[in-house]
């Protein structure tokens, strides 16, 4: 068989493949087929294709509205246009199908030959009873999942759709699931999607299928369902105190519900592991005399919690994740209580304006702490040792004391912003720190990074106006360093070698000198608005530098060294610069922009890929040496220079040439062949007496501006 296949080009279609063994047997090796053959494989599981090293993987898109209408009409009316009076009903059917061909075919066949009342009745029925044929096909992917992945899928369907993936991972992990692996499997099998905003989503019919799985075992007894999300059903269960241990998860929009009824009704749900209550309006704590939180809970999210602390009756021994939004909590427990959170790994407070102090010595296993918009939070205390991995504090204006432990051995990410009363920050020993961001802490004057941060990759400092010095210590793995608008910073200490640094961005500092050291992997260097900087030391070689941007510095000279990969060079408003040393060859340079310098001469060397050259307001420049050939040059702007002559060389792709305000220009040489020149501007070149031969006759020339020149007539 294989020998026969090698002798001819073939088209092979393998439909609905669900395991790698099938592919190994049918398409084990590309050498089985003659070159030019095509193998098309359809599958519900992307991992099957990935594991077999399939070269091109494409997700099948749903039908557009127009395509869906045509397909539906074909099955419902045996033609592509609906019969009289059914156009609007057809639109409703197609909207329900949401681009899924299977549903469109089934509904078209079902409704074929039916009258208008029967159509309306069928559509009304679909709101509560899904199509059996569609659900049966869709459930094939669900049935193939491992048991724990089935549970993750049902949690996403009933509880977590619309959540940001990172938050969903935390909630799922708190319930004991391998969340990252599970979500990846669900995405590969097209049961869920991740939107551009990072939110969990899925097709409406897949959601419908999942909800049907949860409800169908005892459709008329919602108190026995593992997950509850329909508001009216939950309301009835709570009001009748008919909850059972069968319920594991609840997602409740509690707008307008009686809080006391809500809390009493949870008492019988002793195995509840996930509880999300949102949409509440504030209630007075005097309106609620009884507040019950099941002790089995592993993840708890409450909006508008009305009390100053958690209830005395709550034993948080199983709680792994706690998310409080718009709460009135002042502290976790009553004064004097020290109930431990034995398993708490995730804690988040958002817009909890009453929160004053946060003592986390009772949460020894805490891994993630997020505090956002807690305006009156003043102090945060950690235990001496901690398992903390991520700390994020944003918009806590009154935070004055952040007591970091002497050691944070597992901390990988620290982000602080808009903590305007914070004056000092000492990180302690953080050997695993990878990301550090400190921004808009306008009163911070003392900031210490440990002497060694061997795993630090990204460091961002911005809008910390009173910070005068920064020592980044030994950060051998640092890839990104951004220091922006720290307007009092006069000292920046960096190690002599930064072998992995890729991006260096410095702006609005008071540095006088900068030595970027040995940075063999540097790709982007930006230094701007450092108006006291008089010295910039570049290494002899920057072999990977792609972008160099300098603006508003006091440099007198710049030597960019050997930069064989440089693509963009911009030097702007360095008004003291009299010397710019460019390498003899810049083979990849595409953009060169110079403005407001004191250069007298410029030699751009061999720049065979240069596309845009702009030199503006360099009023001392009398010489510009262009290469003999600029084969890719498209735009050339030379404005307000003192050039007397200009020889362009061979520029077959030149489209725009502007020489405005070059008042000393006498001689202009443009090659006879400029087949693409569209715009030529010689305004205020008062000494130019004639155009280069042939320019005025160029058919491609659309704009010719010779205002203020000595040209009296065109040839």
Image (cartoon, rainbow, N blue to C red):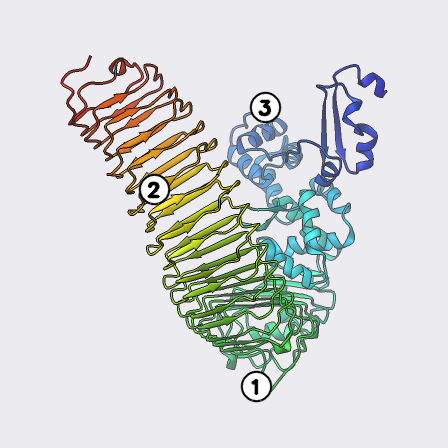
Residue 703 visible in rendering: no
Q: Is residue 598 left or right of residue 459?
A: left
Q: Which residue is tagged 2? A: 579
Residue 417 place in picture, x, y as percent: 46, 64
* Mark 3 vs mark 1, CA separation in Å: 75 Å
Is there CB contact under 8 Å for labels 2 and 1? Answer: no
Q: Residue 64, located in which quarter of the rendered image?
A: top right
Kindly state the secondary structure of the residue where label 1 is placed.
loop
Q: Residues within 10 Å of mark 1 (few under 14, many from 20)?
A: few
In front of the other: 445 or 174: 445
Q: Which residue is tagged 3? A: 79
Nearer the N terminus, badge 2 or badge 3? 3
Quarter holding the N terminus is top right
Nearer the N terminus, badge 2 or badge 1? 1
**Residue lying at 67% horizontally and 42% vertically, measured from the top left:** 190
* Mark 2 vs mark 1, CA separation in Å: 69 Å
Q: Which residue is tagged 1? A: 335
Nearer the N terminus, badge 3 or badge 1? 3
Tell me the number on the disc at residue 619. none
**Residue lying at 61% horizontally and 74% vertically, measured from the top left:** 263
Kindly state the secondary structure of the residue where label 2 is placed.
strand
User: Disc 3 vs disc 1: which is toward the camera?
Assistant: 1
* Mark 2 vs mark 3, CA separation in Å: 77 Å
Kindly state the secondary structure of the residue where label 3 is placed.
loop
Residue 348 place in picture, x, y as percent: 56, 67
Is there CB contact under 8 Å for labels 2 and 3? Answer: no
- Residue 74 lies, with reference to residue 290, above or below; the image says above
Q: How many marks?
A: 3
Residue 57 place in picture, x, y as percent: 66, 34
Q: Is residue 358 left or right of residue 675?
A: right
Residue 563 place in picture, x, y as percent: 48, 39
């Amino acid at each position: 068989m294989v020998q026969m296949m090698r002798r001819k080009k073939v088209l092979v279609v393998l439909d609905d493949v669900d395991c790698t063994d099938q592919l190994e047997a049918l398409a084990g090796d590309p050498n089985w087929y003659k070159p030019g053959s095509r193998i098309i494989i359809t599958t519900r599981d992307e991992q099957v294709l990935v594991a077999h090293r399939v070269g091109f993987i494409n997700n099948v898109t749903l039908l557009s509205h127009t395509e869906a209408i045509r397909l539906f009409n074909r099955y419902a009316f045996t033609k592509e246009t609906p019969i009289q009076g059914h156009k609007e009903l057809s639109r409703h059917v197609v909207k329900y199908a949401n681009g899924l061909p299977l549903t469109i075919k089934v509904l078209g066949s079902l409704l074929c030959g039916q009258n208008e009342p029967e159509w309306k009745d069928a559509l009304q029925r679909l709101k509560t009873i899904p199509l059996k044929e569609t659900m049966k096909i869709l459930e094939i992917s669900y049935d193939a999942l491992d048991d724990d992945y089935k549970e993750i899928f049902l949690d996403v369907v009933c509880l977590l759709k619309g959540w940001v993936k990172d938050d969903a991972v935390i909630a799922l992990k708190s319930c004991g699931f391998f969340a990252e692996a599970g979500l990846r499997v669900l995405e590969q099998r097209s049961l869920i999607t991740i939107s551009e905003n990072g939110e969990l989503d899925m097709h409406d019919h897949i959601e419908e299928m999942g909800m049907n799985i949860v409800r169908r075992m005892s459709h008329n007894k919602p108190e026995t369902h593992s997950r509850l999300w329909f508001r009216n059903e939950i309301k009835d269960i709570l009001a009748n105190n008919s909850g059972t241990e069968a319920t594991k998860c609840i997602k409740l929009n509690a707008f307008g519900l009686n809080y006391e009824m809500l809390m009493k009704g949870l008492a019988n749900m002793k195995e509840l592991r996930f509880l999300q209550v949102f949409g509440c309006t504030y209630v007075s704590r005097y309106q609620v005399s009884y507040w019950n939180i099941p002790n089995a809970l592993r993840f708890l999210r409450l909006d508008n919690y009305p009390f100053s602390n958690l209830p005395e009756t709550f034993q948080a021994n199983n709680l792994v994740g706690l998310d409080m939004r718009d709460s009135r909590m002042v502290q976790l427990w009553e004064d004097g209580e020290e109930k431990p959170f034995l398993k708490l790994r995730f804690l988040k407070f958002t817009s909890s304006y009453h929160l004053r102090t946060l003592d986390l010595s009772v949460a020894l296993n805490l891994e993630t702490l997020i505090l956002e918009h807690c305006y009156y939070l003043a102090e945060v205390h950690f235990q001496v040792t901690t398992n903390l991995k991520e700390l994020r504090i944003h918009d806590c204006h009154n935070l004055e004391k952040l007591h970091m432990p002497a050691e944070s051995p597992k901390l990988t990410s620290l982000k602080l912003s808009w903590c305007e009363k914070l004056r000092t920050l000492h990180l302690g020993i953080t050997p695993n720190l990878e990301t550090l961001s400190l921004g808009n802490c306008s009163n911070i004057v003392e900031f210490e990074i440990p002497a060694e941060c061997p795993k630090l990759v990204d460091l961002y400092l911005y809008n910390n106006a009173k910070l005068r010095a920064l020592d980044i210590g030994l950060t051998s793995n640092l890839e990104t360093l951004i220091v922006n608008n720290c307007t009092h910073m006069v000292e920046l200490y960096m190690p002599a070698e930064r072998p992995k640094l890729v991006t260096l961005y410095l702006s609005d500092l008071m540095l006088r000198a900068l030595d970027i050291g040995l940075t063999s992997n540097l790709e982007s260097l930006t230094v701007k608005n450092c108006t006291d900087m008089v010295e910039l030391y570049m290494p002899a070689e920057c072999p990977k530098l792609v972008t160099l941007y300098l603006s508003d510095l006091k440099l007198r000279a710049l030597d960019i060294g050997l930069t064989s990969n440089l693509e963009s060079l911009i030097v702007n408003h360095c008004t003291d610069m009299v010397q710019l040393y460019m390498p003899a060859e810049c083979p990849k340079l595409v953009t060169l922009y110079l403005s407001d310098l004191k250069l007298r001469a410029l030699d751009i060397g061999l720049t065979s890929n240069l596309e845009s050259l702009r030199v503006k307001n360099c009023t001392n420049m009398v010489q510009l040496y262009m290469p003999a050939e600029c084969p890719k040059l498209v735009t050339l702007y030379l404005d307000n220079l003192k050039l007397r002559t200009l020889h362009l060389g061979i520029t077959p792709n030149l489209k725009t040439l502007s020489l405005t305000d070059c008042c000393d220009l006498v001689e202009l040489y443009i090659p006879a062949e400029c087949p693409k020149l569209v715009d030529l501007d010689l305004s205020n070149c008062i000494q130019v007496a004639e155009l280069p031969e042939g320019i005025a006759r160029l058919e491609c020339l659309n704009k010719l501006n010779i205002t203020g020149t000595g040209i009296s007539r065109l040839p």
